[in-house]
Image (cartoon, coloured by chain):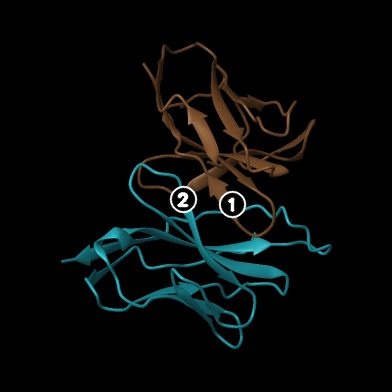
């Protein structure tokens, strides 16, 4: 499985934008970029995913570099509830585009949000 | 409400005893997964199942066993062969692009 590199921790102030970087220099053409987050003592929660184009949803935006070797998760206005561990994961859909790709979690980025 | 349930939330067992962790989903998802998480670490895949009556080993399957007799259920047994069973165990299911996780079971072996 291709690996990702994230900073161990980041800090932000409430209501400010947060840009969480992820490097994945060995990404393959069939790898989707997924982001999950995990609040303390809870299971991870899906945030967003993309392949090549930038993506937006109600939780966040995902900006993907043109060469796909890096991506950035953008929280437009951080709240205290956004404090969590954020995981950047590459999911291989396989040659057949199977929907059941495994997720390989790294250590993620611990995001602290200050009031 | 649709979702994934894991029970119990906290589980204590004596060393040398087998223990089974429950995972049930009513999302009609074909694929289910078991992960283990140790303090300060990311999740590691134990077993996964893409369809009923079929499952595959993940990255750390030694000392664990699973069954998938029903689409809704994917129980995990932690056997006495698992050398360090104390951990946070998470079950997940998926249909396409998104994995849905349960609340987890924190297992402590005394």
Provide the letter of the chain coloured cyan: A
Which residue appears at 73% of the width and 28% of the height?
B70
Q: Chain of mark 1?
A: B
Where's residue A85, x and y in %?
A: 37, 57
**A24 sits to left or right of A14:** right
SS of the residue at dot 1? strand
Mark 2 near mark 1, Cβ–Cβ under 8 Å?
A: yes
Where's residue B15, x and y in %?
A: 44, 13
SS of the residue at dot 2? loop
Tell me if residue A66 comes above or below residue A50 in the rendering: below
Residue A44 numbered mark, or none: 2
Q: Nearer the viewer, residue A92 or B3?
A: B3
Q: How many other residues sit within 10 Å of disc 1, few (<14), some (14-19) or many (≥20)?
A: many
Residue B10 numbered mark, or none: none
Q: In the orientation shown, which residue stands out farthest toward the left?
A: A115
Q: Chain of mark 2?
A: A
**A18 sits to left or right of A74:** left
Provide the letter of the chain coloured brown: B
Residue B99 numbered mark, or none: 1
Where's residue B5, x and y in %?
A: 52, 34
């Amino acid at each position: 499985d291709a690996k990702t590199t994230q900073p161990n921790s980041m800090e932000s102030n409430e209501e400010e934008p947060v840009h969480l970087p992820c490097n994945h220099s060995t990404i393959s053409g069939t790898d989707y970029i997924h982001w999950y987050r995990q609040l303390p003592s809870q299971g991870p929660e899906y945030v967003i995913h993309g392949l090549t184009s930038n993506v937006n949803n109600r939780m966040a935006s995902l900006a993907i570099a043109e060469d796909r070797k890096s991506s950035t998760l953008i929280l437009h206005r951080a709240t205290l509830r956004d404090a969590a561990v954020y995981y950047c994961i590459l999911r291989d859909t396989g040659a057949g585009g199977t929907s059941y790709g495994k997720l390989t979690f790294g250590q993620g980025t611990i995001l602290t949000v200050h009031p | 409400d649709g979702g994934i349930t894991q029970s119990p939330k906290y589980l204590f067992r004596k060393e040398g005893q087998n223990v089974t962790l429950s995972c049930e989903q009513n999302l009609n998802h074909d694929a289910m997964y078991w992960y283990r998480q140790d303090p300060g670490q990311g999740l590691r895949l134990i077993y996964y199942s893409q369809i009923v009556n079929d499952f595959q080993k993940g990255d750390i399957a030694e000392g664990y066993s699973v069954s998938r007799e029903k689409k809704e259920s994917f129980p995990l047994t932690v056997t006495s062969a698992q050398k360090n069973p104390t951990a946070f165990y998470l079950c997940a299911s998926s249909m396409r692009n998104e994995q849905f996780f349960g609340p987890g079971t924190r297992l402590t072996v005394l």
